[in-house]
Image: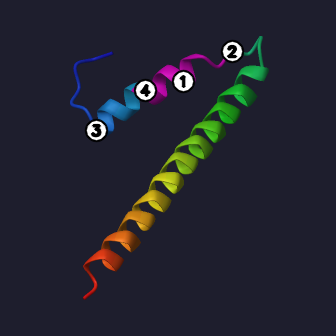
Amino acid sequence: MANVEYGTADYYAEHFSDWLADIDATRPETVDNLLEGFYRAIDSWFDYHDAQAREYAKLRKRVREALAV
């Protein structure tokens, strides 16, 4: 990978380029696997953040109840 700054468009272009380089005309299932992997990653991160948000909501509720006078 080129020496590019994290979070820049160039940084992400390098990562997407790696994905695109895996596409192979002799193995068309690679495209399906790439997309399925992307969907799974989105779902996994969503589930993680959803669970975290629920825990924050529980903490917020307890703090508000404890500090209510």
Q: Residue at x 55, y 50 (%)?
A: 46
Q: Earlier in the sequence, mark 3 or mark 1?
A: 3
Q: Residues within 10 Å of mark 2 (few under 14, many from 20)?
A: few
| Nearer the observer, 19 or 38 | 38
Q: Residue at x 70, y 34 (%)?
A: 36
Residue indicated by mark 4:
15
**Magenta segment, which residues?**
15-23
Q: In the image, 9: left or right of 56?
A: left
Instruction: Say which amino acid is labelled 1.
Output: Trp
Identify the element where label 2 is drawn: loop
| Nearer the observer, 2 or 64 | 64
Q: Earlier in the sequence, mark 2 or mark 1?
A: 1
Indicate the position of residue 27 as horizontal and vertical percent values: 77, 14
Q: In the image, 22: left or right of 62?
A: right
Q: Examine the rendered structure and indicate whether residue 33 appears above or below residue 59.
A: above
Q: Are marks 3 and 1 in contact (CB under 8 Å)?
A: no
Q: Residues within 10 Å of mark 3 (few under 14, many from 20)?
A: few
Q: Could you tell me how far apart the alpha carbons at marks 3 and 2 are, in whole angstroms? A: 28 Å
Q: Examine the rendered structure and indicate whether residue 23 appears above or below residue 66.
A: above
Numbered circle sitting on residue 24: 2
Residue indicated by mark 3:
7
Residue indicated by mark 1:
19
Residue at the outermost top position: 26
Q: Could you tell me how far apart the alpha carbons at marks 2 and 1 are, in whole angstroms? A: 11 Å
Identify the element where label 3 is drawn: loop
Q: Could you tell me how far apart the alpha carbons at marks 3 and 4 are, in whole angstroms? A: 11 Å
Instruction: Say which amino acid is labelled 4.
Output: His
Instruction: Say which amino acid is labelled 3.
Output: Gly
Q: Are marks 2 and 1 in contact (CB under 8 Å)?
A: no
